[in-house]
Amino acid sequence: MSRATRILDQHTQEALPPLRWLLQPNDTRFAHPAEIELARLLTFYGQRWAYEPTTFAVRWGSDGRPEEFVTPDFYLPDRDLYLELTTMRQRLVTRKNRKFRLLRKHYPNVRVRLLYLRDFERLQHVYGTRYDEQSARLGAVLYDQEDVERRIFELAAQFVAESPLCDAGERRYRPVLLGVGPGSDRFLTSLGEKIHALGVAVDLDRVDLTSMSVSDAAAHVRLTRTPSVPLAGRLVVIVQEVISSGLSAAFLENWLRRRGAEEVTVCALLDRQTARVVDVPLICRGFTAPDVALAGYGLTRRREFQNLPFIAEIETD
């Protein structure tokens, strides 16, 4: 066991306070504007955080004294997770990567996730890169209608095989499939129909969440539509057309548990795992989402692209 690991084992991180004070647009505590945006994003979705609370020694001299250190940008106490946002030049990124490799080596129990600039851009634009809607057009079809329907049937079969079945006569014990936003409607309906066809009764419902406001730095996510079915004591499956950062699903998981849901899991048609910030109980995923803007099956806000029965790339001039 390394000296650093022994030191880590001797100390327990103290409980951190509730959400930090409301952020201001020109907060001077942060070293880069992107850190302000990440802090706002975490705060919006109810993730408690502390900025640079811990400095780790990662290299020692022959006399045993620390000579090199690393300080991750954020600590999320409820997730026991450190986040480091990297927006610098490649030469400096290489140096930082080396330090974080040493951190993982000497502190194997410390969970740390590096977010590069490209990762952060994914957080800001949930459906991929920003595009000009006026010049947008459909590109290559990634998954045709047959592919999508077959994969949803496979997800339904997986759900039936792996989820605890319930007495169809006891409505309150039926699983609840809970869509997130109107974009989930098509996937939610198709998944529910296929599960029902396999002999399992489920209730379908939906929640709507507010979007993060550019002008309101102090905003927190709110539900503008809440479930109409009882939740207490039930299995609730959060159904999303695409999952990326995991922040909205994590917020909903906590919200549902506070309202008595016995178990909360997540099912997504598309998984953009490279953009994940926090882990969620994702039990069913349809396809891997590439890092491009996508259309079809509820993806994108442009109506003529949203309701397509297949999934395609969006191209722009």
Image (cartoon, rainbow, N blue to C red):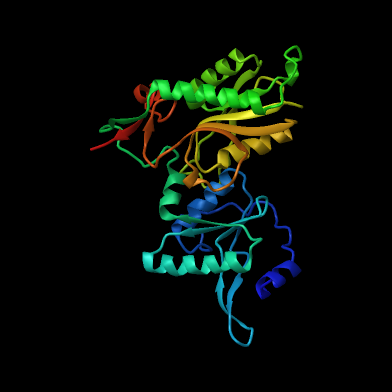
Q: Quadrant of residue 70?
A: bottom right
Q: Pick whichever, 294 or 230, lies toward us.
A: 294
In the rendered image, residue 289, in percent from the top left (x then y), is placed at: 43, 37
Q: Residue at x 56, y 74 (%)?
A: 69
In the rendered image, residue 309, in percent from the top left (x then y), is placed at: 40, 20
Hey, which residue is sitting farthest left in the picture? 317
**Position of residue 264 in the picture relative to residue 302 (left or right):** right
Hey, which residue is sitting farthest bottom in the picture? 63
In the rendered image, residue 219, in percent from the top left (x then y), is placed at: 56, 43
Q: Residue at x 68, y 69 (%)?
A: 5
**Position of residue 93 in the picture relative to residue 245 (left or right):** left
Q: Pick whichever, 263 or 284, lies toward us.
A: 284
In this view, 5 is above or below 110: below
Image quadrant containing the N terminus: bottom right
In the rendered image, residue 94, in percent from the top left (x then y), is placed at: 42, 67
Whether residue 129 can be seen here: yes
Q: Residue at x 54, y 48 (%)?
A: 277
Image quadrant containing the C terminus: top left
Q: Pick whichever, 115 or 182, lies toward us.
A: 115
Q: Quadrant of residue 113?
A: bottom right
Q: Quadrant of residue 146?
A: top left
In this view, 49 is above or below 253: below
